[in-house]
Amino acid sequence: MTTLKNKVAYITGGSKGIGLGVAKALLNQEMRVAIGGRSEERLAAAKAELNQDKRVLTLVSDVAKADDEENAIKDIVSAWGQLDVVLANAGVGHFAPVDELSLEHWTQMINTNLTGAFHTLKAAVPHLKKTEGYYMTLASLAGTNFFASGAGYNASKFGVVGFTQAVMLDLRQFGIKVSTIMPGSVATHFNNNDPGEKDAWKIQPEDIGTLVVDLLRMHPRTLPSKVEVRPTRPDLKKKN
């Protein structure tokens, strides 16, 4: 997919953070970008920030609900006639020792982070077959490195990594590329963080956007199926 102009992408959780950073990068490549999210207000603010009315479509959708994602994909194809790239980016995180982790928080993480990625792909795969498109998931280094108070989050992200790698084997026969991106610390609002100068040492959302573009521009014969990415110098955290 070395020619990106006018290709159509769908980004879940696209109204802020990594999703919004990727949307900006794809728009810079003259792609058309649909961003999904649960908040109509945040989506409207994101669309205003992107400032590309003709190339941006906003979709109110909760990835934990299969019908929402079915309708979102239908709206994209109805508007633009095709679907070339999907980034399953929507995610939530709650952190507590397992004996204190609530059932509500466990269920929300599994349903959003893991089952949500399945819902998005299930709705998108017939269209990706037509375009020999690209499906990506936004996992995490927490999908391979466990930590205390991360039982629910680790479970969801370990699941996303395993899910995506199996999907890659299922779909490569159709010419569909599949990758999972596993970032370390990223400067976003995740876990109630307020990004600022203190986060300068972290990966920035636009860095993930650059990475996604690089993956899309990779020669069709080559597939980086799992990409780990970390801050270069995490020791800078101690100096802020």
Image (cartoon, rainbow, N blue to C red):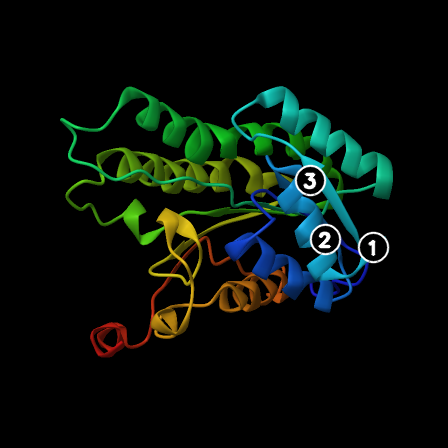
Q: Is residue 80 left or right of residue 96?
A: right
The residue depicted at 65 percent of the width and 63 percent of the height is 24
Q: Which residue was labeled with disc 3?
A: 128
The residue depicted at 31 percent of the width and 53 percent of the height is 141
Q: Is residue 236 visible?
A: yes
Mark 1: secondary structure:
helix
The amino acid type found where label 1 is placed reads Asp
Task: Please name which of the two marks, 3 or 2, marks the residue nearer to the observer.
Answer: 2
N-terminal-most mark, 3 or 1: 1
Image quarter hosting the N terminus: bottom right
The amino acid type found where label 3 is placed reads Leu
N-terminal-most mark, 3 or 2: 2
Looking at the rendering, which quadrant does residue 234 occupy? bottom left
Q: Are marks 1 and 2 in contact (CB under 8 Å)?
A: yes
Q: Is residue 75 left or right of residue 9?
A: right
Task: Please name which of the two marks, 3 or 1, marks the residue nearer to the observer.
Answer: 1
Q: Nearer the viewer, residue 139 or 176?
A: 139
Mark 3: secondary structure:
helix
What number of labels is visible? 3
Q: Which residue was labeled with disc 1?
A: 53
Q: Which residue was labeled with disc 2?
A: 47
- How far apart are the two marked residues, 3 and 2, measured between alpha carbons? 25 Å
Q: Is residue 156 left or right of residue 119?
A: left
Q: Nearer the viewer, residue 25 or 174?
A: 25
Query: Tag 1: Cα neighbours inside 10 Å, few (<14), some, or many (≥20)?
Result: few
Residue 66 — which label? none
Mark 2: secondary structure:
helix
The amino acid type found where label 2 is placed reads Lys
Query: In the rendering, at what x and y percent does residue 131 appear?
Result: 74, 45
Q: Is residue 18 left or right of residue 220?
A: left
